[in-house]
Amino acid sequence: MTKTKPTSINLKTGLAEMLKGGVIMDVVTADQAKIAEDAGAIAVMALERVPSDIRAAGGVARMSPPELVESIMKSVSIPVMAKCRIGHFAEAQILEAIGVDYIDESEVLTPADEDFHIDKQAFKVPFVCGAKNLGEALRRIGEGAALMRTKGEPGTGNIVEAVRHLRQINRDIKRLTVMDDAELMTEAKNLGAPYELVKMVKAQGRLPVPNFAAGGIATPADAALCMQLGAETVFVGSGIFKSDNPSQFAKAIVKATAHFDDPKMVLEASRDMGGEAMRGVAIDTIAEGMRMANRGW
Amino acid sequence: MKKPLIGVLALQGAVQPHKPHIEAAGGEFRAVKTPVQFDEVDGFILPGGESTTMLKLIDNFGLWDSLARNFAEKPVWGICAGCILIAEKVSNPAQKSFGLLPISVERNAYGRQLESHQVEITGYPVSFIRAPVITNTGEGVEVLATHDGDPVWVKKGQAMASTFHAELTLDFPSPMHRAFVEMVKKRA
């Protein structure tokens, strides 16, 4: 063994390592959480409404009621995540006090602060945040996010935005890896990202924390697509419990995610969906101001 | 001599971080998830992840029999969730397991993520993440390390278990990977 003090992956990121290669499912009741767990979900996101219902309901979407989050935590043994509004550190403090395993500072809820995201370093609980590109991802990691995900366009059942964000981050990373060291400060300025993190990404050729896919995943094929584009786990929101047969559908998504690189298994999963996927929404029919991916910076 | 081929069960969890450790310890790494792949490897690492999820996936994908047959013949190292999968008895909640090691394990005994922590085991920094606790060890179980009075690294015959994560430390190889690759070499 070498004498130098070994560096370890940050502990908060450690839990994210345990979540790799799986499916995190949005649930709104303890019963749904049980269905998700039985289907092989690695974690659940405890919500009052799934994104497509939040979209339909309009108004202000806030953190879920504590009783709901607690009842879901009691019903399953897998990790439980919950969402707070962008910049709403008081909601995050409540979720930390409840003891959730992860907090998602999420654009699905109505932002509480248009200038500042939460100082996530100040919390012991790990955070997940969404990003559309490398600069945004590194800003969130700089603030202390332990795990990144694409924003996608939540609640649409339309994968196009998640694909765009995955490809954009991959492209941004690739560009960095071939840059001369002298170019990095300017690139950090252009990305609006911390210089130290930019250097780290260039050296490692990957994000310093795991990157998951979220926003619009509605079929086993969508999950396999995201995994092959480099996502390390997928979040499925409205897709599961808005489908015809949630239990079977959840199992099919899990199977396709675990075997994303084996088309025969993804085919089997696609046959086992137990009915139709959610209907889905074309992105250009959503007014610019209603697009959740545009929230945050 | 041919390098021992270490299969890391790759249904879910912290799989890739094992690669540099296994290679630095003189083994070959392979992520495995099908019965054909299980038959090809010389030893298994059941990685950290969610034990409930792994168990469901093993059942839902029909992998139990093939894994049990392979585990009976080859060295197996269960880490955190993997430790739970190979223990004889599991509590909080009770769940089925392969029972390769006569130990009792209580799940998430340190609490949720907020209670995860980092310590040194045999002079090597490791992480406990939503870790289980080995509450009882049966006859012939060798305790290789303890933490706060609880056994955290144990071994009997061809089965080894740890409740902490050595694979997340970026100093290759960890003493645990070195020990496991040696176990596999001895058999192979």
Image: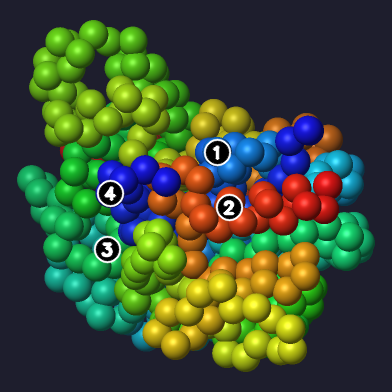
Q: Residues within 10 Å of mark 2 (few under 14, many from 20)?
A: many
| Depicted A16 relative to depicted A63: above or below | above
* Observer able to see residue A80: no
Q: Chain of mark 1?
A: B
User: Does label 2 lie on the same chain as label 4?
Assistant: no
Q: CA distance from mark 4 to mark 1?
A: 18 Å
**Do the residues bearing badges 3 and 4 touch, measured as CB atoms within 8 Å?**
no
Q: Where is residue A55 drawn, in percent x and y?
A: 38, 53
Which residue: 62% across, 74% down? Answer: B154
Mark 1 or 3, closer to the camera: 1
Mark 3 or 4, closer to the camera: 4
Q: Is residue B56 left or right of residue B174?
A: right
Residue picked out by circle 3? A84
Q: Residues within 10 Å of mark 1 (few under 14, many from 20)?
A: some
User: Does label 1 lie on the same chain as label 2?
Assistant: yes
Q: Nearer the viewer, residue A27 or A260?
A: A260
Amino acid, disc 4? Lys
Amino acid, disc 2? His
User: Does label 4 lie on the same chain as label 3?
Assistant: yes
Amino acid, disc 1? Ala
- Sequence-earlier tag: 3 or 4: 4
The colour mode here is rainbow
Helix, strand or loop at disc 3?
strand
Q: Chain of mark 3?
A: A
Q: Where is residue B181 drawn, in percent x and y?
A: 67, 49
Q: Chain of mark 4?
A: A
